[in-house]
Image: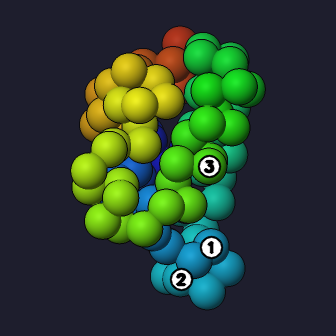
Amino acid sequence: GLVHEKKLVPLAQMLDIDIGSDKLTGIAYPASGSFVQYLIDTYSLARLKTAFVLEARTKGDKAKQDTWTTAFGKPIAGLEQEWLAWIGEHYGK
């Protein structure tokens, strides 16, 4: 997959893309699906819903109160490391 082929870009870089009209769509679409599944399986649908609402705020508001730390207790980089480990556990290395 994308992880093994070293084609995955950092999640923080994918947060603001417009899937479907961005050159990273081919990477971002499957990555976002996998990341969402990880968040639901690991943290809960309720926390994902909280993040969804918080992520819709302005950049200024998000800078004052980080979406990911508020919803999941850790920044996006920490969640990304957990997600990559989860991929390895569920889909082999």
The x and y percentages for residue 53 are 62, 49
Compare residues 17 and 68 and report the one nearer the observer. Answer: 68
| Residue 34 makes an appearance in the image | no
Q: Secondary structure at mark 2?
A: loop
Label 3 Cα crowd, 10 Å radius (few <14 / some 14-19 / many 20+) = few
Q: Tell me the residue at 61%/36% (across/down).
A: 50
Question: Sequence order check: which comes first, mark 2 or mark 3?
Answer: 2
Q: Secondary structure at mark 3?
A: helix
Q: Tell me the residue at 51%/54% (across/down).
A: 55
- Spatial distance from mark 2 to mark 3, Cα to Cα? 23 Å
Place residue 44 in its image quadrant: top right
The numbered disc on residue 22 is 2
Q: Is residue 86 rendered to the left or right of residue 30?
A: left
Three-letter amino acid code at the position of disc 1? Ile
Q: Are marks 2 and 3 in contact (CB under 8 Å)?
A: no
The x and y percentages for residue 81 are 33, 27
Q: Is residue 55 rendered to the left or right of residue 85?
A: right
Label 2 Cα crowd, 10 Å radius (few <14 / some 14-19 / many 20+) = few
Question: Sequence order check: which comes first, mark 1 or mark 3?
Answer: 1
The numbered disc on residue 53 is 3
Image vertical order of residue 48 relative to residue 25, above or below: above
Compare residues 68 and 12 and report the one nearer the observer. Answer: 68
Place residue 25 in its image quadrant: bottom right
Compare residues 23 and 39 and report the one nearer the observer. Answer: 39
Residue under numbered circle 1: 19
